[in-house]
Amino acid sequence: SESWEAVTYAAEEASAAFHALSRLQERAELAALYSGSSSELKAISAIVGCSSVGPPSAVPNLEGLAKYLQDAAMFVESEGECRDSRAFGKALSNASKSLRALAQEY
């Protein structure tokens, strides 16, 4: 289906972005969390099928991605030195919650 195909393309692009973030990150723990996020997104991008197959097949990856983002949120909020760290941590936490909710739908 075209809609699931669009999801896989978006997941592939997001995977590349998180991979780039992991390479730019100087803090090893945060780099590993970004790398893990990239891997989960890459796995989602590789799921072939229609909208009835793709989302249920992606549940383990959505849950894994949610965990990586929540862990990154906690790290950023606790280790962040700039004033934007709290806002970024909250954004990561909100994304994690949304992914968990999506995974529970399937």
Image: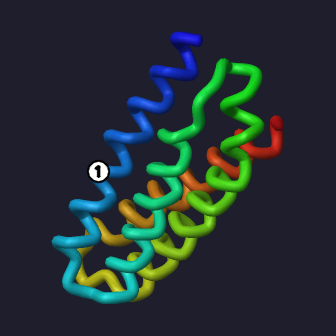
Between 62 and 73, the one nearer to me in the picture: 62
Question: Is the residue 43 above or below the residue 39 in the image?
Answer: above
Disc 1 secondary structure class: helix
Q: Residue at x 69, y 33 (%)?
A: 55
Between 46 and 81, the one nearer to me in the picture: 46
* Numbered marks: total: 1
Q: Residue at x 68, y 57 (%)?
A: 63
> What percent of the width, then of the height, locates residue 100?
71, 51
Coloring scheme used = rainbow
> What percent of the width, then of the height, locates residue 69?
51, 64
Tell me if 46 is positioned left or right of 86 in this view. right
> What percent of the width, then of the height, locates residue 43?
53, 50
Between 38 and 46, the one nearer to me in the picture: 46
> Would residue 97 be visible to someone looking at this image?
no
* Quadrant (top left/top right/bottom left/bottom right) for the C terminus: top right
Question: Is the residue 54 above or below the residue 65 in the image?
Answer: above
* Quadrant of the image occupied by residue 68: bottom right
- Identify the residue under disc 1: 16
* Quadrant (top left/top right/bottom left/bottom right) for the N terminus: top right
* Quadrant of the image occupied by residue 84: bottom left
Determine crowd level at label 1: few under 14, some 14-19, many 20+ residues with C-alpha closer than 10 A: some
Q: Residue at x 63, y 47 (%)?
A: 99
> Would residue 34 be visible to someone looking at this image?
yes
Question: Is the residue 13 above or below the residue 33 in the image?
Answer: above
Tell me if 40 is positioned left or right of 33 in this view. right
Question: Is the residue 50 above or below the residue 91 in the image?
Answer: above
> What percent of the width, then of the height, locates residue 50?
66, 19
Dot 1 amino acid type: Ala
